Amino acid sequence: MKMKLIYGLCFITIVFAAASCKKYLDVNTDPNNPVTASENLILPPIITDIGTTVAGGTFSVSNISGVAEINAYWMQQISLNQPLPQFESYSFPTGEAEFPWGEMYINILQNLKRLSEEAEANGNHSYGVISKVLTAYTLGVTTDLWGDIPYTQAFEGNLHPAYDKQEDIYNLIFKTLDSAITENQIDPGNLTPGVDDFLYQGDMSKWEKFAYALKARHYMHLTKAPGHTAPAQATLALDALSHAFTSADDEATLDIYSDAAGHESPWFKNTEIGQGGVVLGAPLIDSLVSRSDPRLPIIANKGSQGTYLGRESSSDVVPDVTIFSTIADYYAGPSTPVPILPYSELEFIKAEATFYVSGAAAAQPIYQQAIKDNMVKLGLNLTSPAVTGYLARRGTLTAENALQRIMEEKSIADFLSAETFTDWRRTGFPKINMVANPQAGITTIPRRYPYSAQEISTNPQPENTNVKITDRVWWDQP
């Protein structure tokens, strides 16, 4: 595992040196001179980048917050014991958007295009499948954060690529995933993935399941989108789920980290002492304590006063940050894997979709099984009084409470997932309140990312002009 991380990060340094060095180029840079490399060399750093900077929320070399970490601040799962302004007080200037925007476009999407072109030119269809699945994943994250984005013209040498509407990007995501599924049925080619595939070691049946899992995720994102209904989207999602992950053995998880210096898991790097006091948020800790959730000691460490204590977002800086609970090793140990799309997400998608189609009673056993599976994954005994009591208290779904309970449990099972921000926007759960000291002019909880300063200055378009982080994206309807 250690060698995987060295391999991936070294290749990032070599291939992306011209696109990084703490200066993140924007989408308008001419991409028509790609570095020549075979598919098995292009793939490892792409997967590493997705796991570390998107799902893992950081880029430890640059010590900059990535997608999942920013989302965790906004969802008040974590808090930073530092003076304002900062992300959790909704301070997100366009300059801060350079890193996540550049990661998506330069270090991931542009290089996925290179991977796709090499695979197509060489007839190596397994790599073509992987490039399409990861492109769909990355496009989904990008459009869910920014809304309309440049893509169809972005990598064609156009200095001012037009923006695609979010609805069109969603249609492209589904088309890309369908194409990946179809391509997976033909001859894989002469060069096939193996150890360079950090997710599935070349098991293409699991990549196909990943494609269906992404279809289910994105169908459910559109439950309130214009021209869509929750029952219709749920029906599509349930069909996709029938071909997706069947157990935690199928989930997309990046397991390449170790306790060697410089090779630690991103959430370990996000929350180590040198990061300035990243601790758990009060809403998360308070909810776990109030429900006597047996997962609490697996998620959180007690503070120095011997209690579970979360920090209120954007509150005053305290002299002794050790009084607050921190993320436990299960989620933030140095060798902890990073889930890119966990099986638990699909279980709760199935519960939510079943609720929309067949009602609360039909969703209840699916919902309870999802909680049980998460408890087992975390090492809890399902017959213990703490677990059986919790299941009894949380088990009965009704028409009135079903969506709230499903989303609350999903947010715990998928703790630190960037997807929680999307779920909150489309459902309103788990419930959170605005922070006490928001950035001046911000009157509601943010609902999208700002475009990067470079993108706005070099590619001015109507879609990236006068955008506020409190604006809603296309599918995010009241």
Image: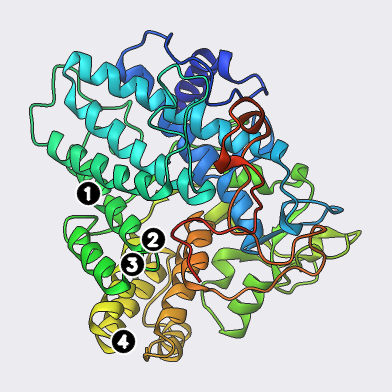
Q: Are marks 1 and 4 in contact (CB under 8 Å)?
A: no
Residue of label 3? 349
Vertical placement of residue 419 versus 382, above or below: above
Estimate the spatial distance between the alpha carbons at disc 3 and disc 1, rounded to whole Å.
15 Å
In the image, residue 290 lies at what x, y percent?
61, 84
Vertical placement of residue 190 versus 107, above or below: above
Q: Choose the circle earlier in sequence order: 1 or 2.
A: 1
Residue of label 2? 221
- Give the amino acid type for the residue marked by disc 3 in the picture: Ile
* 1 vs 2, front mark: 2
Q: Which mark is residue 137?
A: none
Q: Residue 75 occupies which quadrant of the picture? A: bottom right
In the image, residue 378 lies at what x, y percent?
44, 64
| Residue shown at 59% from the left, 59% from the top | 447
Secondary structure of the residue carrying tag 4 is helix
Residue of label 1? 209
In the image, residue 103 lies at what x, y percent?
54, 32
| Residue shown at 73% from the left, 56% from the top | 90
Q: Choose the circle earlier in sequence order: 3 or 2.
A: 2
Estimate the spatial distance between the alpha carbons at disc 3 and disc 2, rounded to whole Å.
10 Å
